[in-house]
Image: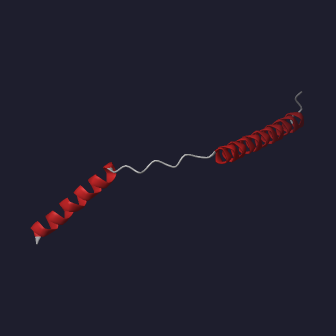
Amino acid sequence: MKKLLAFIVAGALLGAGAASLAKLPPAPPKSDAEKKTEADKAAASKAKEAADLAKAQDRAVANYKKNHAAMGKK
């Protein structure tokens, strides 16, 4: 029984090792339309992140000024 279990474990390890060395087929090339839509999405995402960062910076500056003035400092 122990030999059978050892053979099963060894087979599973060999199978896992072989599967880890297998290569996936290359992805199909993207068309020009797909590339353009991907670039547009990336640009829109970058613009939204920049706008969100600007809003956060403006809130931080306003908060700093409000708290700084409340402490009686210039």
| Picture quarter with the N terminus | bottom left
Question: Is 20 on the left or on the right of 55, as rendered?
Answer: left
Observer-nearest residue: 27 or 67?
Answer: 27
Residue at (68, 42) in percent of width and height: 39
Q: Residue 30: image x %, image y %?
A: 59, 46
Residue lying at the far bottom of the rendered structure: 1
User: Measured from the top left, where is residue 73 in percent x and y?
Assistant: 87, 29
Task: Say how the picture is coloured.
Answer: secondary structure
Q: Nearer the viewer, residue 49 or 57?
A: 49
Residue 58, above or below 13: above
Q: Which residue is more in the foreground, 16 or 3?
A: 16
Q: Quadrant of residue 4?
A: bottom left
**Quarter containing the C terminus:** top right
Q: Position of residue 13 (x, y in %)?
A: 24, 57
* Horizontal side, residue 2 vs residue 15: left or right: left
Q: Is residue 21 above or below residue 6?
A: above
Q: Residue at 85%, 34% (x, y): give it.
A: 68
Q: How many marks?
A: 0
Query: Which residue is most to the top?
Result: 74
Residue 5 position by quadrant: bottom left
Q: Position of residue 67 (x, y in %)?
A: 84, 38
Q: Report the side of 52 relative to 35 (left or right).
A: right
Q: Residue at x 65, y 48 (%)?
A: 34
Q: Is residue 8 left or right of residue 63?
A: left
